[in-house]
Amino acid sequence: MGYSPERKAAVLKRMVPPNSMAIRQLSQQEGISEATLHKWRAKARGKGQLLPDADAGPEGWSSLNSEILRQLV
């Protein structure tokens, strides 16, 4: 199943603060496999997006992440 760039951006945005949602939780809420979400996160990181790991807290993250995300997708 293909996902639109808008859908991917919306889901990835939920991974960064202030949401900082774990992939497992996102998978359950969005109906997207964890493997797909991990691939999206890896691809975004490869393009320079700063996305926290599952156990990372929001400390030190800035609103710049949202702007970078908009540019990548």
Image: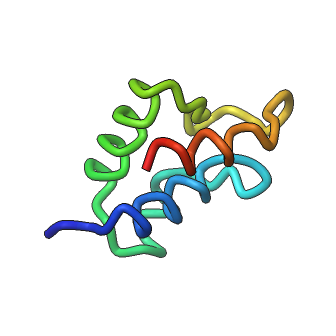
Residue 12: x and y, percent?
A: 51, 53
Q: Of residues 67 and 27, which is closer to you in this image? A: 67
Residue at screen point 43% across, 28% down: 47
> Total number of numbered labels?
0
The image quadrant that residue 3 belongs to is bottom left
Q: Is residue 35 left or right of residue 62?
A: left
Residue at the limit of the structure toward the right, as seen here: 59
Specify how the rendered protein is coloured: rainbow
Q: Is residue 63 above or below residue 8?
A: above
Residue at screen point 53% across, 44% down: 71
Q: Is residue 19 left or right of residue 54?
A: right
Residue at screen point 61% across, 59% down: 14
Residue 73: x and y, percent?
A: 43, 50
Q: Is residue 49 above or below residue 70?
A: above
**Quadrant where the image shows the N terminus:** bottom left
Q: Is residue 38 left or right of residue 49?
A: left
Q: Of residues 12 and 68, which is closer to you in this image? A: 68
Q: Is residue 34 left or right of residue 51?
A: left
Residue at the limit of the structure toward the front, as seen here: 71
Q: Is residue 11 above or below residue 22?
A: below
Residue 57: x and y, percent?
A: 76, 36
Residue at screen point 62% across, 55% down: 21
The image quadrant that residue 13 belongs to is bottom right
